[in-house]
Amino acid sequence: MFATTALRASLISLLLATSALAQSPELLEAVRVHRAGVSDQAKAELDACAAKKCADRERLALLSGVLSLSDGNASRAVDVLGSARAPKGLEAVHAWYLGEAQAWAGQRAAAVKTLQRAKKAAPSWLTSRIDRRLAELFLDLGDPTKARALLDADPDVARLPELLFTRALAREASKLTALARADWKLLALKFPAHPHGLAAQARLEAEGAWSLTFDEQLARAQALLNAGDAKGCLAALEPLKPGADGKAKLALLKGQALLTRGKERDAEAQAQLAIAAEGAPAIAAQALMTSAKRLMRLVDNAAARAAFRKVDDAYPGDAAADEAGYLASWLAMNSGDFETAVTDFAAFETRHPDSKRRDEARWFRGFSLIRSKKFLEARLVLLTLSPDFPKSSLAPQALYWATRAVQLRGATPDAGPAADVVAEYQALVNGFPGTFYGLLASERLQELSVEAPLPFSHEPKQLTVKRPAGLELAAALARTGLFRDAAAEVSRALGAMPAGDALTWGHALQALGDFGAAHTLAARYLWGAVYTQRTPEALALMYPRAFRGSVETWAEKNDIEPALAWAIMRRESAFSPEVTSFADARGLMQLIPPTARNIAQTLKLPPADDAELYSPEWNIRLGTWYLRALSVRLQHPTLVAAAYNGGPSSVARWAKERGDEPLDQWVEEIPFKETRGYVKQVTTDLFIYRQLYGGPRARLSLVVPQPGVSGVDF
């Protein structure tokens, strides 16, 4: 029930100081980070509260009941929730959890009445939960008609296997055999690795109704592969006997599945892909793309490039040709064949006039010309990007490098039309203040002994605002410790918020300690106020000093700038303590558990549960130490940012191999798109924080230092 989600941060920090709560700050923090034994801690506090008749006992009782339910103790949850009044304003939430507890305790009829009462005043995010639980209860109580009505109205019924399973049962109980079997079949096809999908298949087999067409069998096998079950996919494909039209489809899926099974199955995979390449154009193009990407992963760039070129030449009308032509050009550039890359990127734009990658092709053509020292030609190409693609995010980098091309070319007879380098750099600083290229332009101006303007010269300003009525429920839920529900309510409230109220709502959220939601509002509604008007009140939301006490304390102890921690935090989690990435990186600074354990072991700290990474204090403590260790080794904030995202070993290798390049070029040549973007944003944010809050006025060194021998390698 309290599993981490990607919802916004729990509202906890400042609200603890605004109310006298029955539950202690220690309990609320334990709830928020999902600490083991928190249910027992809540029970002890509730017992102590009852003995001294403390104020606000209803909130503590609600929290204790919810935690008991989360632990699987439904009977105690019923007792606690049933014997306590609902906190004012939380009547629907209290009734929802009481109904849930009654349902799990087997008190179905009572649960229906309680949930129907809850639904009358429930917010939208809770209504869907209530309806889904009611559907299950109606089915258990022998009323499948009511269950079907609720599930048929649920927009997610075909997307969530649990709902689809319940509707299939309701249809079956209603004697709607054909409709029930349709749901069972859909479950088995869409979710073949899920327990409900397996149960659906077994049920249909038992009834003699398990019959799939060839395309349906392929779809089921594809779903198994998508779920990471390549072995199951191959087993599902093995007995299939395709006709002439299906042979290539079958071979394509077999080849894709075999490629995931290791080198020992590689020859089989290639044989299947060769068969698929003889099929219809759409299948053949996919087969060739699969083979080409395999070669790309093996760093066989020449063979991969030839394979991509073949796709683009043989299937120009297929969607795969767009990607293939682009990747073939990119591989030429990445291999250092800049002359070919320039020709290929230009040809790509001509061959694919509707491609969404045309601006990227234009940029890489210009940068390839920079790399091949054809500076005048590069400038002419790069200056066309902004007018030809006015909405492209690549405009600032194209303009920066167009100006750099003038400097790199120097004062030679064929340098081209005269250019006012200073004016162009100043235009970049003023026109793109929140970008890496505005920062680089500022540094280039200082090299020319020209005073660079400070885009952000006024310290952000906090507003003291009355909390909007639309946030009262979220605040009440947070005060109670129901942080998951508070996040859901914040999402609902923000969806209903008038756009013109973003500034007021953002500062109200910050006053509640929800820096993540406030930052989301600023990014969505206040972009112009931040980067055009430079409004101090908007800047405070976009660039907050989130969790300031902890950040400044641990930054000082670890001898790093607080600004660097905030810059990393802004990019990693957008100031939300409870986010979890697909790689299981956790918390404000997105530390993965193995890295956190290595840091704690290095510091000789007692091991902490991985859930503690959702605690801002612990996350910041470990994260700032790690930043210091990276700084010792890599000696430059841009390289530190690259290492934080791409790993210190890789960055140290790039610094050794390309350390003679200036920083701007070094960054452009980082081989991973995600890391390039990450480095640019973190470096820029570091300098923006310095400007906003009076940090050190150190310049951005454009020299790539050689890595040191100390520091960290994990």
Image (cartoon, rainbow, N blue to C red):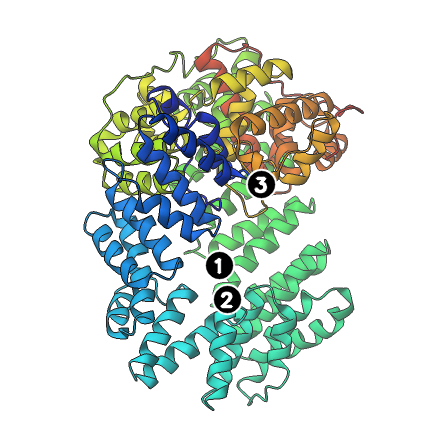
**Residue contact at pointers 2 and 3, CB within 8 angstroms:** no
Determine which residue is flagged by label 1: 351
Which of the two residues, 254 or 197, is positioned nearer the viewer here? Answer: 197
Three-letter amino acid code at the position of disc 1: Arg
Q: Secondary structure at mark 2?
A: loop
Q: Which-is-in-front pick, marks 1 and 3?
A: 3
**Residue 226 visible to the viewer:** yes
- Which of the two labelled residues, at mark 2 and mark 1, occupies the earlier sequence position? 2
- Which of the two labelled residues, at mark 2 and mark 3, occupies the earlier sequence position? 2
Residue 564 in percent (x, y) is at 56, 22
Q: Secondary structure at mark 1?
A: helix
Other-residue count near label 1 (Cα within 10 Å), few / some / many at <14 / 14–19 / ≥20: some
Side (left or right) of 700 relative to 184: right
- Marks 2 and 1, how far apart in space? 8 Å
Residue closest to the far left: 120
- Marks 2 and 3, how far apart in space? 41 Å
Determine which residue is flagged by label 2: 316
Other-residue count near label 2 (Cα within 10 Å), few / some / many at <14 / 14–19 / ≥20: some
**Residue contact at pointers 2 and 1, CB within 8 angstroms:** yes
Q: Residue at x 74, y 32 (%)?
A: 652
Residue 638 in percent (x, y) is at 61, 26
Q: Which-is-in-front pick, marks 2 and 3?
A: 3
Three-letter amino acid code at the position of disc 2: Pro
**Residue contact at pointers 1 and 3, CB within 8 angstroms:** no
Q: Residue at x 51, y 47 (%)?
A: 361
Which of the two residues, 298 or 228, is positioned nearer the viewer here? Answer: 228
- Which of the two labelled residues, at mark 1 and mark 3, occupies the earlier sequence position? 1
Q: Residue at x 37, y 21 (%)?
A: 539
Residue 648 in percent (x, y) is at 71, 33
- Marks 1 and 3, how far apart in space? 41 Å
What is the number of the mark on residue 585? 3
